[in-house]
Amino acid sequence: MIYSTEILLPKLAVPNPPTRKLLKVTKGLVYKVEMQFPPGCAGLAHIGIFDGSHPCWPSSTGETFNLDSYTISFDDTYLKLVEPFQFEIWGYNEDEKWPHTIHVRIGLVSEEVFMARFLPTYAWDYYLKKLKEAEAQQIKEREEVLDNPFPWVK
């Protein structure tokens, strides 16, 4: 799934207090992050994405993304397994004349089978789990047949 939102940064909203926007997501693995800075931002519109108080993108404390006419797009493998299932987008604008709207998109998969595509070791653990489940089912079915090999005969 791709979760998308935009954050409007009013003109000359200095770092205290920044603008905050919540992006609701599901439990799962973030595999892609995009932030679109439209033309005219001139590096004056700043945003950061947080999981609670933890800075995710950029992960350096106190840093922000601030560009002009550019979409930042990168792959990631960030597991979001604990509630609340949301990311906080914080931003501020140093532009004295214009507000700016930054678009944010987060790609997230919530099923284990899809997570395995991005985390190969996770895939192996998932495969072993499914293999053990299949083996247990086969043992159960074999025991049922041994207990009653001819169910049609009473």
Image (tube, rainbow, N blue to C red):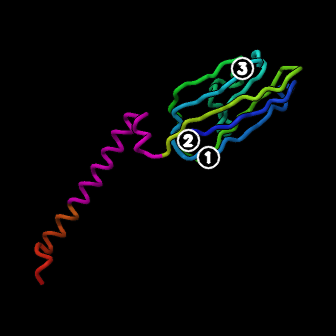
User: Could you say which is closer to the camera, residue 41 or residue 125?
Assistant: 41
Looking at the rendering, in which quadrant would you find the N terminus? top right
Q: Which mark is residue 80?
A: 2
Tell me which numbered mark, 2 or 3, is placed earlier along the sequence: 3
Task: Look at the magenta stretch and give its main secondary structure.
Answer: helix
- In this view, 37 is above or below 137: above
| Mark toward the viewer: 2 or 3 | 3
| Mark toward the viewer: 3 or 1 | 3
Tell me which numbered mark, 1 or 2, is placed earlier along the sequence: 2
Amino acid on which disc 1 is placed: Phe
Amino acid on which disc 3 is placed: Asn
Q: Which mark is residue 66?
A: 3
User: Could you say which is closer to the camera, residue 147 or residue 101?
Assistant: 101
- In this view, 12 is above or below 114: above
Across and down, in percent, residue 84 comes to 64, 48
Q: Are marks 1 and 2 in contact (CB under 8 Å)?
A: yes
Write the start and end of the magenta stretch as one range.
111-138
Query: Left or right of 25: which side holds 116?
Result: left
In 3D space, how far apart are the residues under numbered discs 2 and 3 (Cα atoms)?
A: 25 Å
Q: Residue, x 77% and y 18% (percent of image)?
A: 40
Amino acid on which disc 2 is placed: Lys
Residue at disc 2, secondary structure: strand
Give the residue pinned by disc 1.
85
In 3D space, how far apart are the residues under numbered discs 3 and 1 (Cα atoms)?
A: 26 Å
Across and down, in percent, residue 72 comes to 61, 22
Q: Are marks 3 and 1 in contact (CB under 8 Å)?
A: no
